[in-house]
């Protein structure tokens, strides 16, 4: 009888008398099969190419447990449908999410992931995990990786084909780098035109130019007036 199970890292094997592995016809009343031997096993998924198995030997006993095999002659064994099939199981890889990177002119990566569905101590071979995502500029990218991993069992055997791999991607977010624009103090004599105002800009790490204008509180009477830089709160990779 065909035998099958989902991959779990253990053998699909005949243990004990395996009464669900065969059917018997033609035995006298009270007689039964005993000591059946089926040594073929299957551990890894093989749904595309099931393994044929054979019944190697058996004993026929009567109701009292006596061996009566010898009274049966011309015993025919039909193993045409005797196959062992192990089906692959679903597993998933979810890449990590990192949302607190600050723009610094370099490319940011986040090589973290979790798995679900691996069985019996199986694990991902870190030498074959390849992330493809990186983000340099402000914004959000999918934290993608090459959508195939190598899976090993506790003995180092490759069991990748025993899984159906699914991939879910987190995100990498780069936030604007803080920048300060401080207006310098200026002065003029009463009745003169305003001088050209200047600023000190701190936080820029490349040749990007922050756009802003300088305005001051209206008034021409002697006194102190505030000079204020005005511009968009976020500009490119800066805020």
Image (tube, rainbow, N blue to C red):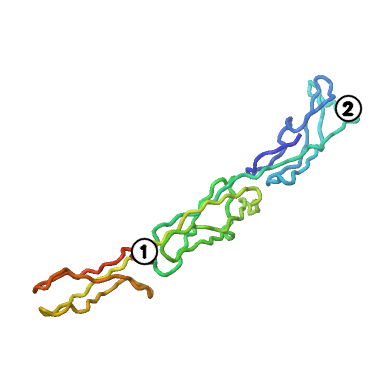
Nearer the observer, disc 2 or disc 1? 1
User: Circle 2 sits in a helix, a strand or a loop, which is it?
Assistant: loop
Tally of numbered tags: 2
Query: Label 2, on which residue?
Result: 72
Camera-side residue of 25 and 230 = 230
Residue at screen point 25% across, 69% down: 229
Asked if residue 114 is positioned above or below residue 55 in the image, the reply reads: below
Quadrant in the picture for residue 191: bottom left
Residue at screen point 51% across, 61% down: 133
Residue at screen point 75% across, 36% down: 2
Q: Quadrant of the C terminus?
A: bottom left
Q: Quadrant of the N terminus?
A: top right
Q: Position of residue 145 (x, y in %)?
A: 54, 58
Q: Position of residue 167 (x, y in %)?
A: 55, 51
Q: Work out whether mark 2 precedes mark 1 in sequence or the reverse, and give the earlier one.
A: 2
User: Circle 1 sits in a helix, a strand or a loop, which is it?
Assistant: loop
Query: Label 1, on which residue?
Result: 176
228 relative position to 4: left or right: left
178 relative position to 18: left or right: left
Crowding at dot 2, Cα within 10 Å, few <14 / some 14-19 / many 20+, comes out as few
What is the C-alpha distance between the residues marked 2 and 1? 86 Å
Whether pointer 2 and pointer 1 mark residues with C-beta atoms closer than 8 Å, the reply is no
Q: Position of residue 170 (x, y in %)?
A: 48, 54
């Amino acid at each position: 009888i065909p035998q099958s199970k989902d991959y779990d890292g253990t053998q699909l094997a005949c243990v004990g008398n395996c009464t669900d592995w065969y059917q018997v016809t033609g035995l006298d009343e009270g007689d039964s099969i005993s000591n059946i031997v089926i040594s073929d096993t299957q551990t890894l998924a093989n749904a595309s190419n099931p393994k044929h198995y054979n019944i190697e030997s058996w004993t026929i006993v009567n109701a009292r447990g006596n061996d009566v095999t010898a009274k049966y002659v011309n015993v025919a064994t039909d193993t045409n449908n005797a196959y062992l099939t192990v089906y692959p199981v679903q597993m998933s890889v979810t890449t990590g999410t990192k949302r607190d990177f600050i723009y610094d002119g370099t490319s940011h990566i986040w090589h973290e992931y979790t798995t679900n569905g691996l069985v019996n101590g199986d694990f991902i071979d870190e030498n074959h995990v390849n992330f493809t995502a990186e983000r340099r500029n402000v914004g959000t990218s999918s934290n993608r990786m090459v959508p195939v991993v190598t899976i090993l069992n506790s003995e180092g055997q490759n069991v990748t084909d025993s899984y159906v791999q699914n991939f879910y991607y987190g995100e990498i977010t780069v936030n604007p780098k803080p920048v300060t624009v401080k207006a310098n103090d200026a002065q003029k004599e009463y009745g003169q035109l305003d001088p050209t105002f200047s600023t000190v800009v701190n936080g820029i790490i490349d040749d990007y130019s922050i756009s802003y204008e300088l305005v001051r509180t209206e008034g021409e009477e002697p006194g102190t007036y505030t000079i204020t830089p005005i511009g968009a709160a976020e500009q490119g990779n800066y805020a």
